[in-house]
Image (spheres, rainbow, N blue to C red):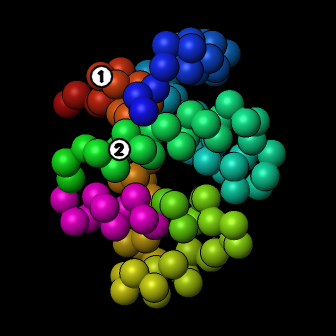
Amino acid sequence: MLISDLTRLILFKVIIQQSTAEGVAGRRFIIRRTLERIREGSATSDEVAIIHSALQLASKLPGTTEDKRSMAALVFYYLSAEPCTARSIAEDLNICTKSFYRDINRAIDILTVAVFGIDGVEFQ
């Protein structure tokens, strides 16, 4: 299921409220903050639906083994029914905690693109 126009409009409203000057970094912040609200149990049903749609889309995108591990780390950390610590997830994935946080950042980059499309890509 692709992200609907209504979802994009909702996210656009959130972006405007944050700051349009922040660009891709601001969009990444929105995704990270939404994930944190889901982990805390304070996210709205719309936010949860947006993230789940983005995860479904991201799972269909081609990616490396590291990308898939990154997405798994994100799901375990933010979306598990039972909260997991960074250390326990890192141990389960046979990586160090520093690599775990790098994986989380990579997964957030992937989700940012899944939600915002080309507007989630940082060109250098």
Q: Which mark is residue 118?
A: 1
Figure check: 88 above or below 59: below
Residue 75, horizontal then vertical, whole percent: 51, 61
**Magenta stretch, overall SS:** helix
- The magenta span reads 64-73
* Element type where label 1 sits in the image: helix
| Residue 40 can be seen in this image | yes
Mark nearer the viewer, 2 or 1: 2
Residue 58 image label: 2
* Number of other residues with Cα within 10 Å of mark 2, as a class: few under 14, some 14 to 19, many 20 or more: many
Give the crowd class for mark 1: few <14, some 14-19, many >=20 residues within 10 Å: few
Q: Amino acid at mark 1?
A: Ile
Q: Position of residue 40 (x, y in %)?
A: 77, 55
- Mark before the other along the chain sequence, 2 or 1: 2
Q: Choose top left, top right, bottom left or bottom right for residue 77.
A: bottom right
Q: Residue furthest right?
A: 42
Q: Residue at x 61, y 48 (%)?
A: 35
